[in-house]
Amino acid sequence: RQISCLAMAAARNFGAVLLGLVAFAAACDAVAAGEGVSVPLTRVATAPLGRRRASASAAAVEGGSGTVVPLKGGYAKDGFYYSPIEVGTPPVTFNVLIDTGSSQIGLPSAVCKSCGDGKGPRYNYQASTTAQPVACGSQQCEVCTTHGGTPGEGACDFGKPYCSSVVPDLCGYGYAYGGGESFLTAHLVTDTVTFGGLTLNTTIAASDGQWPAGSFEGLPPNGILGLGYDANACNPTCVPTIFTQLVEAGLVPANRFGLCLDGEAGGVLDLGFFDEAKYSKAALQWVPVVQERWYNLPLRDITFNDTTIGLPPMAYSYLNDQIGSFIDSGTTAMLFGPLQWKHIIDTWQADFCHLPGVCGAAGTTIFDGQCLTAEQAKQLPSFPDFEFHFEGEGGANDPVVLTVASDFYFVPGGDDGSMCLDAGSAVGISAVLGDSFMASFYIAHDRVNQRVGFAPIDKCA
């Protein structure tokens, strides 16, 4: 049968829904020694994604860089990487999406009437003895820029701070995901959070409204934890980001983290260090971060079998009306701007029309959301690699080419052997390289030197 993946692709849009679970992994003796922490991420997916890799052992393993915790796997209609956190006193456990494309902690609040059926946990600051609500008009609420300005005409990054419309005494907050596909309003509260066995006070955006309604409903993740830059947490009040706070408090040894996403068995987030056991150190290729909101990278071309899709480098850049090209663990698919996507389709239909699903009448191709049948999917090894050309640390004369094979960018469409293209288009971007890209590499986020390193994965265990 022909299977439409349009609904699945829509749900996989970057940060399309505020869902998630970020949990604390085991606390580790290595923290006391100033070493890193490994946080397990559970993968919820339609089915196993990507090439098969070694699984984690059944027991935690003490590594030289920190504590490595075994990963658990899970499957559902949509795919996310998540882990638990504990919030407040007494602690309440939330499962939060690990998202490098956003920067705040967002949880559904007890007063939210549009956050679903209420069967999952809700954050209630009045039930936590360690909660410190952020009052509207307070000094903390009035911080609205990361550039040292004070509230006033033109001083705020995204408008003046305001009061919550649901809890008027508290500082309001609002954020969007998926390029505006979903919106949340919130009130701000500072409370105790335990993440990866590390405990500190940080600011929570407690959602008191969601559009569309029920974004947390019926899915394992019921919150989000962002690992993006501080500038991305001004909406309009600027809240401190948990990873920056962990670094400043000395709870992680360095301003860096590694991310290893296994398509079948979850993944690992290495806080404060890069785990060389997961990759070949000599194979790390470094690409500079060019915009410190998301992890924007200088993508310069996309090719297939060395054939360019024919766009100039600026088509992939951060411009006045597009937010450029970046990696994002909160997005399952690889997403491209409408122009970039059209050029990709044109290149495929010019050079690979002999492959199933590439050419055909409108509405019948893999680009229209149709999946390959099990029989057609036998030809997946013949599909071309995506070849992404970046500027390296040495600029245009130091290119870095990263390839993604078809067994990563096609995902199972069900239990019948069908396979769906895990790529599509979204407005306002150049390229969002989500999990189907990221699962090909161990990704070293070096925030000290503002660069990201990529290496083939030996194992995520």
Image: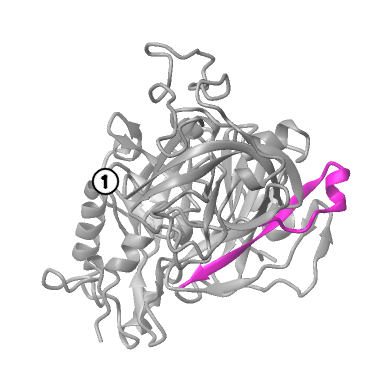
Labels in figure, total: 1
Q: Is residue 456 visible?
A: no
* Residue at point 68%, 34% (across, down): 245
Q: Which residue type carries mark 1?
A: Val
Say what secondary structure mark 1 lies in: loop
The residue lying toward the viewer, choosing from 12 and 311, is 12
**Magenta span covers which residues?**
23-45
Q: Is residue 181 visible?
A: yes
Whole-percent x, y for residue 175 in the image: 41, 40
Q: Image check: 279 left or right of 355?
A: right
Q: Image check: 317 left or right of 217?
A: left
Where is the N terminus found, in terms of image quarters?
bottom left
- Mark 1 = which residue? 427
Whole-percent x, y for residue 454 in the image: 57, 50
Q: Image check: 386 left or right of 82?
A: left
The residue lying toward the viewer, choosing from 123 and 328, is 123
In the rendered view, tell whether residue 268 sits above or below residue 135: below
Whole-percent x, y for residue 171 in the image: 50, 30
Whole-percent x, y for residue 155 in the image: 43, 14
